[in-house]
Image (spheres, helix red, strand yellow):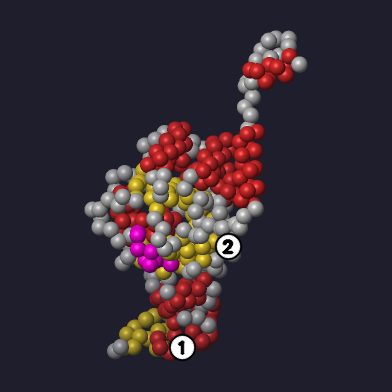
Amino acid sequence: MDKFKNVMQHGYEQLPQTGEQKVPKVSYLAQLREIQETIESKACQDIRFAQPLMTLNGVGIIYPNTISVIQGQKGVHKSRLTENLCAACVKMDANREFIGFKIAPLKRFHVVYGDTERNLNDQFPFAIQRIKELAGFDKTSRPNNLEAFSLIEIERTERFEAVKQYLDDVRQNHADEHVIVILDVITDCIGSFNDPKESMKLLDHLNMMINRYNVSFICVIHENPNSFGEGKARGHLGTELINKASTVISIGFDKGANGNSTDLIVLKFLHTRSVKKPEPHFLRYSEEARGLVLADADFIADQKSLKAEKAELGELKDWLLENMMGEISKTALLDQLTQYFGCTAKTVETRLKSLTDGETPFLGRKKNGKEVFFTLNAPF
């Protein structure tokens, strides 16, 4: 009875022999009962599911109050993809599309872009400038719905607290807007992405924010090397992040049969909680646009033919040795090789160029008027 009185009156339990006091017990019963009532009340009503914030070809990709993930290996344009999604949210013109992605009509966002890798002198400022230009703003403008911060000068052990303070301040200043937070890359937001306690502390905070406030997260993370296709996001944080995410997008260069990368960039939707997984989405890098653009049908077909490794160099050499007699025009040779290997003329031209280059070319090449002719070089 005395033990019971101590707990009820003082919130702690006094040990009978030593008089030591245990840590005060916190009761979560009232909070859990309140949650119970909320759930049961909503379960008695018609459920209205949230509409997507962003779509791709009419399919919902990013939804409000969720965590989305963009993952990929180094150098596959993760940040360029993220810049397009950011620009789509900053731009007020709902009819404007960004590499196929489109924001929901009449939606207004406040976007916060947090970076951890690029320097503050030119790299990250250029990325923000690029976002503004993609969104239709002049580079000298400062859109009031876009802000950026960097953790590059914050000690790793202090980064979680720095992120928490910054996001709390953003939430308070933009309580009436839907805030989209981009963390690029999320593994650098804590001291160690392999530490379960640090990882869960960060993810618990993200989950708390999306459940209590008008906030969504887009988290960028590296994949482990040589894992594209069924890529494993880095560290314990990556594992838990994928479990919590509503949408997981993997970006990488499409691979050929021999494992070499093509120039075709493919987005694979590894997980979509609210809809059926969309089909892969194809992009390419454009020097003219200085960024990602949609891959057209011809480019996809050409890269797919490379992926199938049709007219592989070894096979092509064998065919030429067996079938090429004397000099042959490029037109005639292309016609024969495309029919035999079932690939595009551009693929064959790429292979032939490899056979005519170098110190000891396999093929000789000469031009007679407007026509190009090939011959086998000896000896073999």
Q: Quadrant of residue 86?
A: bottom left
Badge 1: residue crowd in 10 Å (few <14, some 14–19, many ≥20): some
Residue stretch rendered in magenta on the structure: 91-100
Q: Main secondary structure of the magenta part?
A: loop
Front position among marks 2 and 1: 2
Q: CA distance from mark 2 to mark 1?
A: 45 Å
Q: Hey, which residue is sitting farthest right in the picture?
A: 1
Comparing 64 with 314, the one in front is 64
> At 45% across and 37% down in the image, what residue appears?
164
Comparing 50 with 269, the one in front is 50
Relative to residue 4, is residue 38 drawn left or right? Answer: left
Comparing 129 with 43, the one in front is 43
Q: How far from the left and from the top, in percent, is residue 371?
A: 34, 88
Q: Amino acid at mark 1?
A: Asp
Badge 2: residue crowd in 10 Å (few <14, some 14–19, many ≥20): few
Residue wearing tag 2: 275
Residue 202: mark in rendering: none
Q: What is the secondary structure assignment of the residue under circle 2?
A: loop
Residue wearing tag 1: 335
Q: Are marks 2 and 1 in contact (CB under 8 Å)?
A: no
Q: How far from the left and from the top, in percent, is residue 237?
A: 55, 43
Residue 166 seen in the current view: no
Residue 133 highlighted magenta (yes or no): no
